[in-house]
Image (cartoon, rainbow, N blue to C red):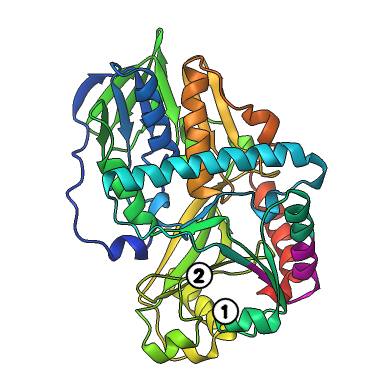
Amino acid sequence: MRPFPLHQRPSGWQSQLPERTPHPPLKGSHRAEVVIIGAGYTGVACARAWQALRPDARVVMLDAEAVGDGSPGRNSGFMLEIALANDVDDSALAGMRRMNDLSRQAMDSLRQAVADHGIECGLARTGTYRAARGPKGLASIEAYRRFLTASGLAFESLEQGALAERLGTTYYAKGLYSPDCWLVQPAALIRGLVDALPAGITCFEHTPARTVERDGGHWRVQTPEGELTSPHVVLANNAFSRALGADGSRLATIYTYAALTPPLADALRDQTGGHEWGLLPAHRLGCTLRTTADHRMMIRSFYSLEREQDNARIAAQLHARLTARFPALGDTPFDTVWGGTTGLTYNGAPLWGAIAPGLHVSAGCNGGGIVKGTLLGEALAHQALGVPCADIHGLFGTPSWMPPAPLRRLGFEAISLKERYKGRHEA
């Protein structure tokens, strides 16, 4: 497989932003103390932490695309300070509290970077809703309510009428509101973070790593027009790290799909809540929804394994799901529709840590995204340099084995079919 994705369409978030001059690609032979493959949230956090611990070291980061074109600029822009509902383990509340503490610290560091560097990315602490329509989703809502209560976290329980008043839809029967979430324009955020990197960190864009091979006591990273030699390499390109040495038996690539409307007219804004909000589905195969500061509506849904599906066909399905929730948007076309990738492990635990002397990986975010990636990237730099860090394996677990293709695909399709049936009311 390739060590980077090829997307059918540009990210809708990136297309909203002004043109930016990318950092030049790598050419020729270079040396560095560490080479970080992937200029996403994990890679940036790792680079910043490494440079803070070793101010005189040369830190090099590679990105296969222009910053913002890849997965970090294709997500939904939710920055969660507490555990996702799907990550909750009632039997390990002490560990969950520690995870939440670490997430808050990572969020604080991101918020501080935005403030310090004047990054215009629409960062706003809006909180997030979780809502459900059918029995499976309602059971998930109840389980998450018990977790929030036991953890002493703030939330509101909302019936259908209260949800309709806030969001403009009667689609959902019940939900929860948690204040512990920020919304952001993700492409603007990752562009701003990369452009604000300290002078000791060099980022090369349009520079895919083709191979990572051991060369004596160092690693040699080959790119289309150059090479890097370094004692340390960090694989921060999520599931595509499999092509460079990460364990492919524990990691898969999942494509998911999103769309944005144009800015809505005043009458339609009033029928979609009239303010900026975000909603995560109670069931994994439901729909993520959010509005934006410029009054657009975003929807994300549908999943495919390893291969991106036809975006035109997905667009029609996304529009059907959106209008089921907001009939008033039936005549509103999408401005942009796109696919993006995430790394999936079977049990939700990240593939994280040293996989060979000097070769490190952080992959399998399982949709945790911005805050979780930041947390794991910083911790990986600390571990690699022998600095005490959080017990990532103890808190998040280790990824379990998955069968190879074609059994993996058959298993994915069977599980997806079962989950689609169980969560059919949330579609």
Mark 2 burial class by Cα count in 10 Å: few <14, some 14-19, many 20+ = many
The reply to whether dot 1 and dot 2 touch (C-beta < 8 Å) is: yes
> What residue is pinned by disc 1?
166
Tell whether 236 sits left or right of 352: left
> What residue is pinned by disc 2?
277
In the image, 239 versus 202, the foreground residue is 202
Residue 130 seen in the figure: yes
Q: Which mark is residue 58?
A: none
Main secondary structure along the magenta-highlighted residues:
helix
The amino acid on which the numbered mark 1 sits, given as a three-letter code, is: Arg
Tag 1 secondary structure: helix
In the image, 141 versus 154, the foreground residue is 154
The amino acid on which the numbered mark 2 sits, given as a three-letter code, is: Trp
Tag 2 secondary structure: loop
Q: Position of residue 256 (x, y in %)?
A: 52, 60
State the separation of the CA atoms marked 1 and 2.
Answer: 9 Å
Question: Magenta span covers which residues?
Answer: 130-142
Q: Position of residue 392 (x, y in %)?
A: 62, 30
Q: Position of residue 169 (x, y in %)?
A: 59, 84
